Image (cartoon, rainbow, N blue to C red):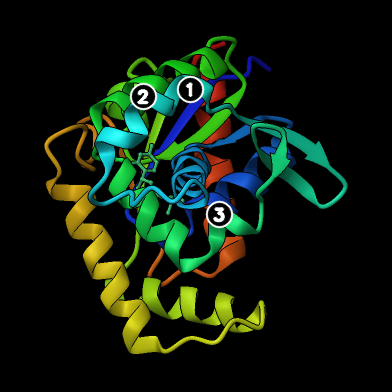
């Protein structure tokens, strides 16, 4: 079967990463988590004492020295920032907010989009993010817009954090989800929007396995069409 390129976009907390990762593992595709790349740039800024919200002038000149790579490990995929493992660090709250802030900086997007296009060149990838179907892989054979209601997305993140032993409040997380939606959808550069030719998958009423099954079904169907 010919492997295709799959673009999955959607708002924060819709389950894109976990669903995409599981579908990629089941079908032998390479999974690229583009959000992790924005998060890693944010961690670079935070660790360098640069405020991602207000000090873009200090961050931009440093971009050439920032390398974000993925490496397979026994626990799944590792995210490396200049060779340092930041897989857990990028999931912390300041890195989430920081990622949303660095994602509005055109120079950051230019750098990361170029790297993502390169990663997608050879096909056989499932890439998730906000602008994959619209900007990074506009020719992807399959585009999916994966979403869920705000309440459902906040509840999932809340449960995830609890499972990781992180202290958190549902109301705070919900506020965070709403704020990130606003940032992602209303920014001037590459705002989150559904590509015209993207298939809408709403997972509010689907559990994890059902969501993965839906994505795998769509990919298999499309693989047959591009034979
Ligand atoms: O998917 P995520 O929560 O890990 O993404 C982190 C931030 O990066 C989020 O605020 C949106 C931004 N992002 C983006 O602008 N473009 C992408 N392709 C992926 C993520």
Q: Quadrant of residue 150?
A: bottom left
Q: Is mark 1 within 8 Å of ligand 1?
A: yes
Q: Disc 3 vs disc 1: which is toward the camera?
A: 3
Name the disc covering residue 90, or none: 3
N-terminal label among 1 and 2: 2
Residue under the point 56% across and 77% down: 161
Say whether marks 2 and 3 touch (CB < 8 Å): no
- Using the rendered image of the protein, determine whether residue 127 is visible from the camera's viewpoint: yes
- SS at mark 2 in the image: helix
Residue under the point 55% across and 42% down: 217
Would residue 205 appear left or right of 225 to someone viewing this image?
A: left
Name the disc covering residue 116, or none: 1
N-terminal label among 3 and 1: 3
User: Which percent across, then down, holds residue 120?
Assistant: 53, 18
Query: Measured along the vertical axis of the image, is residue 163 above or below residue 225?
Result: below
Residue hosting label 2:
61
Q: Quadrant of residue 152?
A: bottom left
- SS at mark 3 in the image: helix
Label tally = 3
Q: Quadrant of residue 117?
A: top left
Residue under the point 37% across and 54% down: 98
Q: Nearer the viewer, residue 182 or 195?
A: 182
User: Which percent across, then down, holds residue 9?
Assistant: 37, 42
Q: Nearer the viewer, residue 218 or 102?
A: 102
Say whether marks 3 and 1 touch (CB < 8 Å): no
Crowd rating for badge 3 (residues with CA inside 10 Å; few <14, some 14–19, many 20+): many
- SS at mark 1 in the image: helix
N-terminal label among 2 and 3: 2
């Amino acid at each position: 079967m010919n492997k295709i390129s799959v673009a999955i976009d959607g708002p924060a907390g819709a389950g894109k990463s976990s669903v995409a990762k599981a579908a990629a593992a089941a079908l032998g595709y390479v999974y690229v988590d583009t959000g992790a790349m924005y998060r890693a740039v944010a961690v670079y800024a935070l660790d360098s004492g640069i405020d991602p919200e207000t000090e873009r002038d200090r961050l931009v000149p440093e971009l050439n020295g920032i390398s974000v790579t993925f490496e397979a490990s026994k626990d799944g995929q590792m995210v490396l920032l200049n060779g340092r493992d930041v897989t857990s660090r990028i999931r912390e709250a300041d890195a989430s907010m920081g990622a949303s802030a660095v994602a509005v900086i055109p120079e950051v997007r230019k750098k990361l989009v170029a790297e993502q296009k390169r990663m997608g060149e050879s096909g056989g990838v499932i890439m998730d993010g906000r602008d994959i179907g619209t900007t990074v892989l506009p020719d992807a054979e399959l585009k999916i817009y994966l979403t869920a209601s705000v309440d459902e997305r906040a509840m999932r993140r809340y449960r995830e954090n609890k499972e990781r032993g992180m202290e958190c409040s549902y109301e705070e997380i919900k506020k965070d989800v709403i704020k990130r939606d606003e940032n992602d959808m209303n920014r001037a550069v590459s705002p989150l929007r559904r590509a015209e030719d993207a298939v809408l998958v709403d997972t509010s009423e689907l559990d994890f396995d059902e969501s993965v099954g839906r994505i795998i079904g769509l990919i298999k169907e499309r693989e047959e069409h591009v034979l």
